[in-house]
Image (tube, rainbow, N blue to C red):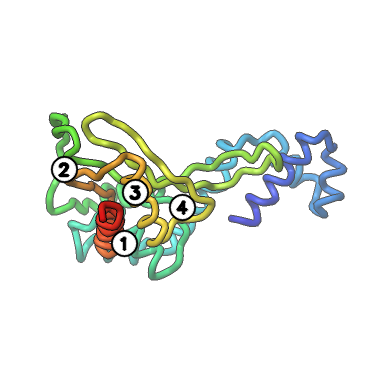
């Protein structure tokens, strides 16, 4: 999938620079019909017609395994299945793709989660300074110089009451130390820390959060002595 995306990006980059289809095919050493296939394809169309079917194919190869997990652990979430596939089989799949596939399997094989259907309702905003939400996200953006799309990652912080935001961007998936540094820089930038931090499904938090808080508190103590 990566090589195909690189080829698509090169075709689009050369097209934007004024090259003809024949010139692109000769330069990239690919057939002209391949160039024609991707020539007028938008990134969204590439995602829907090329990327998503490839992801589905990868999931289909592990269909029986996923079904066994759902049958054995009816309470398992799509996020956990995504993590297991990534850890055990090194599958690079978007969590949304796994979530859609798991939903389809649950409906098709009538496998209902133990907790049943979750109900959501609006809740009152917590008091000021009490809670901050932390999440890791990603987005594909076009490089204005190369005309190629690249993936950027962000660790975002949102104060639950005021919706005040802070974020740190990374060119590659952030690791534990990156999370530690991001939390520390957020606390320093905001001039303090909330009483609660709410994270979204990242297991690495259990090990790195105490490190981040201790380092921040140690720095505050050193600054006051």
Q: Secondary structure at mark 1?
A: loop
Residue at the farthest bottom position: 88
Q: Label 2 near label 4: C-beta < 8 Å?
A: no
Q: Horizontal and vertical percent for residue 202?
A: 30, 56
Residue designated by label 1: 204
Disc 2 designates what residue? Answer: 117
Closer to the chain start, of discs 1 and 4, is 4
Of tags 1 and 3, the one toward the viewer is 1
The numbered mark, 1 or 3, whose residue comes first in the sequence reads 3
Horizontal relation, residue 72 to residue 108: left or right:
left
- Under tag 4, what secondary structure? helix
- Residue drawn at x 31%, y 46% as measured from the top left: 187
Q: Nearer the viewer, mark 4 or mark 3?
A: 3
Identify the element where label 3 is drawn. helix
**Sooner in the amino-acid sequence: mark 4 or mark 2:** 4
In terms of sequence position, does the residue under pointer 4 or pointer 3 come before the other? 4
How far apart marks 4 and 2 lie (CA) works out to 25 Å
What residue is shown with label 4? 56
Task: Measure the C-alpha gap from mark 4 to mark 3.
Answer: 12 Å
Which residue position holds label 3?
A: 99
Please tell me whether mark 2 sits on a helix, a strand or a loop.
loop
* Residue nearer the viewer, 147 or 85: 147
10 Å neighbourhood of mark 2: few (<14), some, or many (≥20)?
Answer: few
Q: CA distance from mark 1 to mark 4?
A: 27 Å
Image quadrant in which the C terminus is located: bottom left
Q: Residue 29: horizontal and vertical position, in percent?
A: 82, 54
């Amino acid at each position: 999938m990566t090589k195909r995306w690189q080829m698509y990006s090169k075709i689009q980059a050369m097209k934007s620079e004024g090259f003809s289809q024949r010139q692109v095919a000769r330069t990239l050493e690919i057939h002209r019909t391949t160039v024609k296939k991707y020539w007028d394809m938008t990134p969204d169309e590439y995602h829907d017609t090329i990327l998503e079917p490839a992801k589905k194919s990868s999931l289909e190869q592990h269909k029986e395994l996923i079904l066994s997990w759902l049958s054995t652990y009816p309470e398992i979430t799509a996020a956990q299945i995504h993590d297991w596939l990534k850890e055990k089989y090194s599958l690079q799949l978007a969590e949304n793709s796994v979530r859609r596939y798991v939903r389809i399997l649950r409906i098709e094989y009538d496998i209902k989660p133990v907790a049943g259907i979750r109900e959501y309702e609006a809740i009152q905003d917590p008091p000021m300074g009490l809670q901050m939400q932390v999440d890791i996200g990603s987005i594909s953006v076009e490089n204005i110089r190369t005309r190629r799309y690249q993936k950027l990652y962000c660790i975002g912080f949102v104060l639950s009451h005021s919706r005040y935001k802070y974020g740190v961007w990374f060119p590659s998936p952030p690791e534990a130390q990156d999370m530690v540094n991001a939390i520390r820089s957020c606390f320093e930038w905001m001039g303090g820390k909330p009483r609660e931090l709410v994270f979204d499904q990242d297991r690495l938090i259990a090990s790195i959060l105490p490190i981040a808080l201790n380092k921040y508190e140690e720095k505050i103590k050193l600054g006051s002595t």
